Image: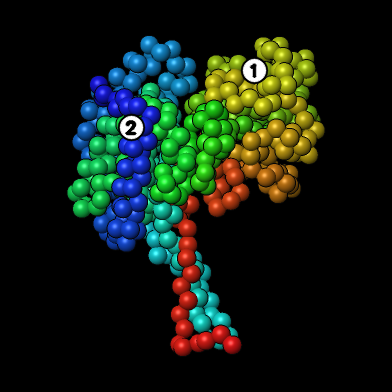
Amino acid sequence: MLKLHEKSRDDTAATMADIGRRARAAARPLAVATAERKHAALIGMAQAILHHEQDILDANAIDIKNGEQSGLSASFMDRLKLDTARIRAMADGISEIAGLRDPVGDVIAAWDRPNGLHIERVRTPLGVVGVIYESRPNVTADAGALCLKAGNPVILRGGSDSLNSSAAIHACLVEGLKAANLPQDAIQLVLTADRAAVGEMLKGLSGNIDVIIPRGGKNLVERVQNEARVPVFAHLEGICHLYIDRSADLDMAARIAVNAKMRRTGVCGAAETLLVDRAVAATHLVPILGALRAAGCEIHADAEVLKVFADAQPATDADWVSEYLDAIIAVKLVDGVAGAIEHIETFSSHHTEAIVAEDADAVERFFNEIDSAILLHNASTQFADGGEFGMGAEIGIATGKMHARGPVGVEQLTSFKYRVRGTGQVRP
C-alpha cells in the first residue's frame, strides 16, 4: 500500500512549490521535443501499462477495499474500479493519442498583407497544466498522455481514494518518459492527501501553472471555479437531456434511451432527463419507460406521465436539476421540439443533449437553438467522450465558452502564436 506523504501545511506548500518549479523547468524542453520523441514516450507508456497490469490491479484492489470500508457510493466505486478491460483500454487510448497528428507547430492559418508581410497563426503548447480529479484512476493516464502530446508538463492531483492506483499508473508514464529521454518532471503526481495541496495549485504555484482542469463532482468543481487564480477548463455538472420527437422511430428511441441512461450511470454523459413529445405519448412513452424499468432504472415522472405509467414516483422540482450519476431518470412530456428546447435551456448544464427524430426540420431547430457543448442526433448521450470523438482520450468535457468547449483533447491543450515574416518592412 502506498504511504501518503503526511505533511504540515508549510511542508505541503513547500512541496507543491517545488513541483511547480520542476514542471516549469520541464516546459521548454518539452515544448521543443520532436514529434518522434513524444511518440516514442507514449508508446513506451502504453507498453508499460500492459506490462505492469498486475501491479496496477493490485494497487487498485487496495483502493477498492478502502473504498468499501469507507462506504463509497456504487457509482463512485464504479468509477474507481479497474479491471483487465479498463487497463487495456487505457493503453489503447495512449496508443491512439500517439498516433494522432502532433499539433505543436501546426499552421492554423496563413495570409499575406498588401505590404508584403506574411503572417501565420501557429499552434503552441499551453504551458503547465494542473489536473485535479477524483476517483477515476484512468484520468492519470489520459491526462498525462494528452498533455505530453501537446507539449505541456502536467501536475496531477488525484483523489486520495484512488491514489494507490494512480501511483501505479504514473510509474508506467515515467517509464515511458525515461525510455524516450524526456524530462521525468513532465508528468508529476502529487503524493499527498492534504487538501492544502489543491489550494496551492489553485493559487497557481507562484505563476508556474497556466491552466487548471478539474474532473470530479460538483463540490470539487465549485471549489476550483471559486478559488482558482488561473484559467479553468471545467464543467460543473452533466445534466444531460434526451428528447424523443414525434417523428422518432420507436425501436430506435427505446434502444437509445436505455443506452444513454444505463450503459454507465456514473459518467457525466449519462442522460439524466428524458423529454417525450406529448404528440406521441400514447405510442412511445410506455414502451420506452418499460424498457428503462426492465433495465433497472428508477423513474421520476411528472404528473402527466404518472397517469399512464404507474411504475414511477412523482418528480419534484429538484429532479430537473439533478445529476443523479445513478440508475434514475426524470421524465416529462413536452410540446414538441419547442417545448424540449425551452426545458433544456432552462435546466441544462450545457454539457450534452440528444434528439431522436426523423424530421430534419426538428433536428436543425434543436441543433441551432440549444447552446450546449455537445448535441447529438439519433445517438446516445454516452458518445460525449473524447475517445469516441477520435481524440484518443480526453481530460474532461468543458462547458465554458472560452478557449475549449466539449471534449478537451490534444488540440484544446494548445494555444497559438503569430509568426510574421517580412522583407525589411517598416511601419510609416
Q: Residue at x 59, y 45 (%)?
A: 400
Compared to residue 214, the image places residue 159 above or below, namely above
Q: Is residue 10 left or right of residue 46?
A: right
Residue 165 position, x and y percent, is 31, 28
- Residue 299, image quadrant: top right
**Residue at which label 1 appears:** 299
Residue 170 position, x and y percent, is 29, 37
Q: Is residue 393 visible?
A: no
Q: Residue at x 41, y 43 (%)?
A: 205
User: Looking at numbered disc 2 in the image, what kind of residue is underneath it?
Assistant: Asp
Q: Residue at x 47, y 58 (%)?
A: 415
Q: How dense is the environment of label 2, judged by Cα within 10 Å: few (below 14), some, or many (20 and up)?
A: few
Element marked by disc 2:
helix
Q: Which numbered dot is residue 11?
A: 2
Inter-mark Cα distance, 2 to 1: 49 Å
Q: Residue furthest front?
A: 10
Q: Quadrant of the C terminus?
A: bottom right
User: Looking at numbered disc 1 in the image, what kind of residue is underneath it?
Assistant: Ile
The first of marks 2 and 1 along the sequence is 2
Q: How dense is the environment of label 1, judged by Cα within 10 Å: few (below 14), some, or many (20 and up)?
A: many
Q: Quadrant of the N terminus?
A: top left
